[in-house]
Image (tube, grey):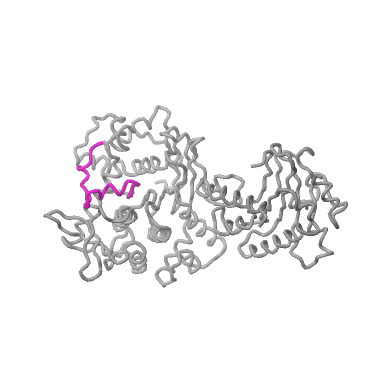
Amino acid sequence: MGFKESVEETPNLKGKWMAGLGALRARDKVRIHPENTSTTHLRGSVYIDEAWMALDPRGNRWDYAIGYQHQNRSDEFIYWVETHTGADDQIAVMFRKLDWLKTWLNGYGKKLGKFDRLFVWVPSGATSFSQGSTQVKKLSDRGIIFSGSRFRIPLNHK
Amino acid sequence: MKIPPRYPRFEVENFGPIKHADVTFGNLTVFVGPQATGKSILLQLLKLLEDTPYIKKEFSRAGVDWSGKFTDFLDVYFGEGMRSVWSDKTSIKKNGVKIDLPDRVEEKRPNRQESMFFIPAQRVLALRDGWPSAFNYYDASTPFTLREFSEHLRLLMSDFGAEGTLFPVPRRLRAEFRDLLQAHIFPGFDLKIDTQRAQKRLVLTSTQEGGGSLPVAVWSAGQREFVPLLLGLYWLMVPAKAPRRTGLDWAVIEELEMGLHPRAIAIVMLMVFELMARGYRVCISTHSPQVLDAVWALRRLKDNGATAAELLGVFDVKPTPGMAELAEKVMKRQVKVYYFDRLGGTTRDISALNPNAEEQSEAGWGGLSEFSGRANEAVARAVANSNE
């Protein structure tokens, strides 16, 4: 089962799958740069935060899932992208969001939880820490990549 | 008379590994980039441009004669075999005005005081025998900057008595710096002059009763690297009311982090700030991401209206009135950072040090954080897909 079908079979996400980066808000779309945007590779997107807002209004919901078929992989891959203020005091918030997402992926979102993945924090606005900082290492240690202001999805998986 | 710009600009083309360098110097200018990309050679060229008559006089005093041949001069100034840095395509401009270097070396100009003090990367060689050697001790294969640095240290020694203490010394450095250096670089030791079989030498003497003295050969690598740097800083920070040594405007420190623990690097960066506060135009080259961390913090704290105490907090230093005044002065100064790109042979202004920059040379701080970036990403990928 591919990304699109898995989205459609996930509770509350039926009908939410969008082609390309269509699920992303305009201000977030400009931050994501797939190397190849053809439908062969860019397998669509879904706005998780919005879809689950009514059901879990107090939860630290994650923003988006973006499906991608890398040229050098047999299975589709999911980039879990959160656009969020890039400040030290938001690291704890990001960890809460990750906890929410992982719980969700083990429950309602288990069909999407089966895909290989990457959790990506794309900072909105200025960033208060650098690439080599302890803060970024703390994030990596929990499985979150802190990208620059623009996140590139390569055609070939690393 | 034309007033020189506040921040001098040098443009250099086809000089050694440099195809095109365009550098505007701030109150502090930092050079980063891989080995052999032209950082040191550009700084040495800058010294040559600023101090040509002084350099010629020093060579003349030492009996060095290049017989009017510019290429031979290049070999004695930059070091043996370095004549190849120059070609008929080499071009140098200062503040937009072309400089004919062969003519400048040839012409007779009135002697001037030295305006740039240069602490070279090979500074440890100046104390290899435990005592700084005279300019003449070195042969013509040694770069001028090392010979001259060693000569300056030799002269500096005459400021101290035959059995004198070099560190800690009242009126040499701020008390705050002395305390930090004692705690982190010379714990339990004083730096002294000792005489062994009629030969003076530097030793680290234990402050414990009955403690012995350690000659240079048994110092830690960090102490061996730091002592010549400390003595160079003594030269710049004169123990008088004048903030600078007469005539000196520029201070160059190559690879200031060599052999030092991060805590010691932080102290040296604070001393660089002191040089800036005294009005020196400071240039440093570095391979240490920590140095750029310090520069980034300075810049971002300044941009966001932070206090002097907050800047000092980065260095884990208390905001004593003297240190707060120093930090306040530094936060008003301009800092420039340039990346030397090996592939293109060019320089790139990465002064913004924006971690979000699209240009990797800026986001990765001239390659100094790139390894961390790759390590972070690899770990994040592995953790995200593990069953933890």
Q: Left or right: B95 with respect to A79?
A: left
Q: Is residue B124 left or right of residue B98?
A: left
Closest to the observer, B113 or B178: B178
Q: Which residues are magenta?
A: B117-140
Q: Residue furthest front?
A: B387
Q: Quadrant of the C terminus of chain B?
A: bottom right
Residue closer to the observer: B347 or B183: B183
Query: Could you tell me if residue A68 is visible in this image?
Result: yes
Residue under the point 20% across and 43% down: B137
The percent position of residue B214, horizontal first and vertical second, equals: 23, 59
**Residue toward you, A136 or A107:** A107
Residue placed at 45% from the left, 44% from the top?
A: B9
In the rendered image, residue A101 lying in the magenta stretch gets the answer no
Residue B120 is situated, as x and y percent measured from the top left of the image, at: 33, 47
Instruction: Kindly indicate the quadrant of the structure image that contains residue B319.
Output: bottom left
Residue at screen point 81% across, 48% down: A22
Q: Position of residue A110 (x, y in %)?
A: 78, 55
